[in-house]
Image (cartoon, rainbow, N blue to C red):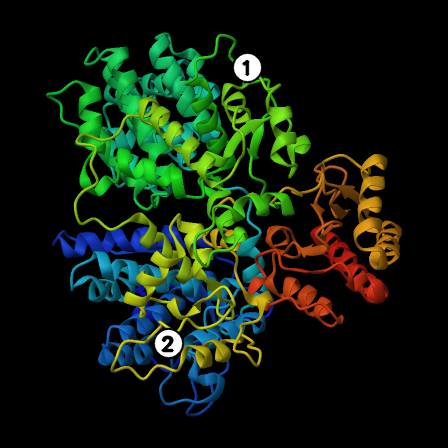
Amino acid sequence: MRAQEITFLKLVQGDKQFQVPLYQRTYSWGREQLKRLWEDVGELVGQHLSGEPTAPHFLGSVVLAPGQIQAGGVQRWLVVDGQQRLTTLMLAFAALRDHLKSTGDERGVDRVHRQVLVNEFHEGLDHYRLLPTQADREAYTACVRSRAEAGGSDNVGAAYRFFRGAFAEGHEAGDERWTATVETVLKDLLSIVEITAEPGDNVYRIFESINNTGVGLSQSDLLRNYVFMLLPKRGERVYQELWLPMQQSLGPKNLELLVWLDLIVRGNSKAKQSEIYREQQKRLQSLVGDEGALQYEVEQLAQRGRRFLRIVEPARESSPKLRAVLERLAAWGGQTHYPLALHLLDLVDAGRTTPDDAAEALRYVESYLVRRLICQTPTTGLNRIFMEAPTSLETDRPAAEAVRRFLSGRRRRWPSDEELRTAIRGKPFYWSGRPPQRSYILRRLEESYRPSEPVDFAKAALSVEHVLPQRPAAAWLQLLAEETEENQTPQELHDLVVHTLGNLTLTGDNSKLSNHPFERKQQILESSALRMNLEIAEAKRWGKAEILDRADRLTDRAVELWPGPIGGIKPVGEESPGWTELRAALVVMPSGTWTTYGDIAELIGSHPVAVGAYLGSNPSLIGAYRVLTVEGKISPSFRWPEGGDRQPPQELLASEGIRFDSWGRAHRSQRLSAAELATLPGKDVTQPVAQDPLPEGEDSAAAERFRTQLRENWPDAHDGVLAALDFWRRQGGYVNYGRFEETSCFPMLDAGTSHRPHLMWPVGIYPVSGTVEVVFQYLKDRSPFDDTEQRRELLNRLNKIEGVDLPEAKLELRPSFPVRVFAEHGEEICEVLDWFVGAAALDLAQRD
């Protein structure tokens, strides 16, 4: 084998083709890996534009084995290892080419297509420079060919859509050189080690060797080995007295974090956690040969380690004020604040600020994080802001003032009081951040009432409750009908307010409250120990007016709890974050889906009319033509920009796979709801009240409630459902039930071992609403259904059953079909369940 470092462009140029063998898994990079790559690209672009010396970024290795070559044909290479990187970069170039096309740069389109994506003078499969494994091939070639179905629901389509959005966003924010610089970075500044096998080498054995290595050394392991190699005389004592206690008190993960944070607070704000060893080694190089100086460095690291422990374990902090805010940030979760918090503790221990001043500074940090979450400010660049903070604070001011001034910088997006009020009134708070963060904000708001007997939140089992229910009964919709605007249905009004903060509270009685009428909820809330619930119980009714009134009261409390930036006014001319979120939502929509103006409005906390006006002014936005009226029709006001040759919107949607009826209405099954739109970019969207299965085994009382509800609401399907559940039990599964008023049912399967459970369930059955949800959203994280082809096979088998119509574009969501299908097709459903169990059993055998 031979190896050489090479740029991506030089790797792919020439009449060659990289073939991914069948034994490789399908393309599997998700949003997190794509974001990391794009952040690296963005850093290189920034350096290049500012004129800084720009060293190539090492992307990893690609192991190739020579394939067959025919006279006049392409040189074929088998991709033994590195197919994820190759596929990702090819999709990035496909997105770049299509972005250039949208800007009218036809020469750029031709250049990228010919230089990178295709072998220009070859046809058929030889035309493609990269040929993925069979399962990914159709989705990949759709992107390379710019076909209508490009950007589908699988991982290939998702990566293409990610890059289309990234180029559109960067183009708007950057100068005229930005796109060209990105192209330069992708071609010439991403470094790859090309490892080439010799003819006759056993390719599969090479692949097996690469992918079955043991656990490698961590970055902190490498640093420790390096340091103690340089301490031949003092090493044993330094290890016993300093390094070992630090390692034992922190544990492996926190030690790794500490070594990275040490670089950050020293001023290396661009240090990556994957490059800790190299950066620390570079820093310590000048001390080689001076054991005293190296010992001092270990002492400094150990001291910083003790400070870091006060951040992750706030009970160790002696100052009450500082301990309280550290506890709040620990409850908030995440590591974003670690660099700045550690820097502040450095200042406290060095006597350069007081504990109270540091506590006030961290209160601003808490406020900054909370306000951004409530306002749903994009998190792009958030980690970078806190990594730059330790060396960017003004040193001639008290720490708290310096932190507030730093975070108030215009590009750091600390929402003003006005923005906070608008967001609390209109944004779907229930989809903001992670569930513990949502609960944390409600808890802090409850504590602001300063009750004489505060609730012990550590012991109370509280969850977030919608006062106006997520699934409203007719009485609720009748109440909302009194407040609807012209041409607005009660359901549309419900969707706009149900997830806002004014409609949410904390309770331990979630299952009791459910979707009861408000009068019944009042009776339950009146007995609550929470002041915010007693306040809700005092209302005479609960509709839009009451929700907005409560939102304003909560805003007053939030402003007091979490102070805003200096000035506290939204900069004039700055675009609303909602439009940024709208563009991001349109980009993540897979081809073959559509949504409505109301769904977009619900997602971003706006109004359908405002959404329509924005899209009418910006029809060229990626995916704008996929937003239809509530009936599923093209809006009469939608027009392409003049001078273009675009297909009519309905024809374009039809070419992507959208089905229309004779009245021009798009098929309802292909519509993405606001919740589904929120799920696609990775928001933690908790499902409606039926929720997910209880952790316990079968519950006889819940089973009886499920059977009764099914018999009362869908009597024709009752026997077919129960027969299918009995069949499931005979196949080795068991049945679980939800905890709410509508007692949902889940056929569960543990496809693991006694030591490693592997729980999964194919569907959730809802006996009142009469729907059967196919839980692709969960299956995509559970082997073997983390493979798109396995989920597609499940979808195709179900779609062969009359009455089931699941759109392929929802392979990562929770599409549904009517429970009445069980009335006449129970046996066919059992055949699908049998296949599901067999696929899980085969996967278990292969894993063992």
| Image location (x, y in percent) of residue 409 | 18, 37
Question: As shown in the figure, which amino acid type bears the numbered disc 2?
Answer: Leu
Residue at 36 percent across and 24 percent down: it is: 557
Label 1: how many Cα within 10 Å (few below 14, some 14–19, many 20+): few
* Mark 2 lies on residue: 117
Depth order, front residue of 137/142: 142
- Nearer to the camera, 138 or 831: 831
The structure residue drawn at horizontal position 56% and vertical position 39%, both measured from the top left corner, is 468
**Vertical arrangement, residue 311 with respect to residue 186, above or below:** above
Q: Position of residue 123 (x, y in %)?
A: 44, 89
Nearest the eye: 784 or 664:
664
Question: Relative to 202, is 653 above or below?
Answer: below
Left or right of residue 363: residue 692: right
- Give the Cα distance between marks 1 and 2: 60 Å
Q: Say which residue label 1 marks.
A: 456
Question: Which label belongs to residue 249?
Answer: none
Total marks shown come to 2
When asked about the image quadrant of residue 720, the answer is bottom right
Residue 733 position (above or below residue 560): below
Helix, strand, or loop for circle 1?
A: loop
* Upstream in sequence: badge 1 or badge 2: 2
Q: Position of residue 139 (x, y in %)?
A: 51, 72
Amino acid type, residue under disc 1 in the picture: Asp
Asked which secondary structure carries label 2, the reply is helix
Q: Is residue 161 left or right of residue 751?
A: left
Which quadrant of the rendered structure holds the N terminus? bottom left
How crowded is the residue under tag 2: few (<14 C-alpha within 10 Å), some, or many (20+)? many
**Residue 735 visible to the viewer:** yes
367 horizontally vs 660: left or right: left
